[in-house]
Image: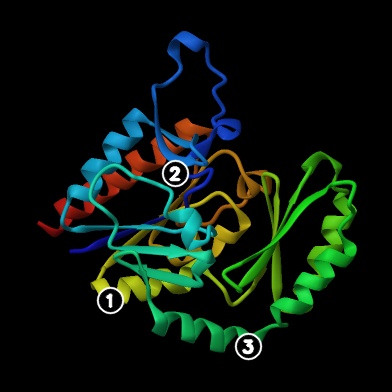
């Protein structure tokens, strides 16, 4: 039996300083391991316990660990996970499939063909974002892998009605909008993590898929997996979103990441015993 473990990264498996959620007294706060450095500064962390559990999980030859993220390839490649290097990684919300760190060109061609057929072009969406964003709260506007667009904003200043209006405009054109931290993503609906996860499962012969994620862009991934987990923070938690195969954790912050890795390990071990 091969078990595929597909996990979202930011605010699911790894956490920036702002997202750690260390609400406990300092003397009992968990020890942290830095897993990402950007511009010579530490950026993302796991608890040391989570790092140890992940190293044990990836050492199991029956488990295929697949980092699954909206990050670009360049942003993903800054991360240094403990344990065996992941043979597959899903970047750009499913638009890029990395095999031993190298983009799979056939997968990218399939994605491009589907986007061209099913939704409005990126340039139209990008120009609309630039036209309607308010300079009072807009800090940056970016394109990612020529697949989707996002804005970096002062979140507290973005009106709820503006976000609702953008969401309605995007949906009519086959796009989805997601607010994650200080970023507002506009992503083509056919661009999904679940499609890439299914492709990796096909290639590896995985018989069971496990997944975790915290944002609306992770909902399709969780629904496509045999079992999933979401932390007690993020867009899905805020919306009280769940599904029969998804466990909604009460834990928030970096300790939720630790709980998710532990759940992956326990479920993989249980499946291994059933297969024995």
* 3 vs 2, front mark: 3
Q: Are marks 3 and 2 in contact (CB under 8 Å)?
A: no
Where disc 2 sits, the SS reads: loop
Q: Residues within 10 Å of mark 2 (few under 14, many from 20)?
A: many
- Above/below status of 190 relative to 229: below
Image-based side of 168 in relation to 108, left or right: right
Q: Residues within 10 Å of mark 1 (few under 14, many from 20)?
A: few
Q: Earlier in the sequence, mark 1 or mark 3?
A: 3
- Give the spatial CA distance, label 1 vs label 3: 25 Å
Instruction: Say which residue label 2 marks.
Output: 13
Residue 35: image quadrant is: top left
Residue 190 coordinates in the image, percent (x, y): 59, 77
Between residues 39 and 239, which one lies in front from this camera angle?
A: 39
Instruction: Say which residue label 1 marks.
Output: 203
* 1 vs 3, front mark: 3
Residue 46 coordinates in the image, percent (x, y): 41, 35
- Above/below status of 131 relative to 156: below
């Amino acid at each position: 039996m091969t078990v595929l473990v597909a996990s979202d990264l930011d605010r699911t498996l790894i956490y920036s300083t702002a997202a750690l959620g260390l609400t406990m007294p300092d003397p009992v706060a968990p020890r942290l391991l830095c897993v990402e450095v950007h511009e010579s500064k530490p950026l993302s962390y796991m608890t040391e316990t989570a790092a140890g559990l992940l190293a044990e999980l990836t050492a199991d030859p029956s488990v295929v660990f697949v980092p699954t993220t909206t990050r670009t390839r360049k942003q993903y490649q800054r991360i240094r996970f403990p344990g065996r290097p992941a043979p597959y990684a899903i970047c750009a919300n499913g638009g890029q499939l990395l095999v031993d760190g190298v983009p799979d060109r056939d997968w990218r061609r399939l994605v491009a063909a589907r986007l061209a057929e099913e939704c409005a072009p990126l340039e139209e969406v990008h120009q609309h974002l630039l036209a309607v964003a308010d300079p009072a709260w807009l800090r940056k506007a970016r394109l990612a892998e020529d697949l989707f667009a996002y804005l970096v904003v002062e979140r507290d200043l973005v009106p709820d009605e503006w976000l609702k209006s953008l969401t309605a405009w995007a949906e009519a054109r086959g796009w989805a909008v997601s607010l994650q931290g200080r970023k507002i993503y506009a992503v083509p609906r056919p661009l999904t993590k679940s499609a890439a996860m299914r492709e990796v499962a096909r290639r590896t012969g995985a018989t069971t898929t496990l997944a975790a994620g915290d944002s609306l862009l992770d909902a399709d991934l969780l629904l496509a997996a045999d079992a999933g987990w979401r932390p007690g923070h993020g867009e899905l938690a805020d919306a009280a979103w769940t599904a029969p195969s998804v466990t909604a954790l009460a834990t928030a912050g970096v300790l939720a990441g630790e709980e998710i890795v532990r759940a992956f390990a326990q479920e993989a071990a249980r499946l291994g015993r059933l297969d024995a």
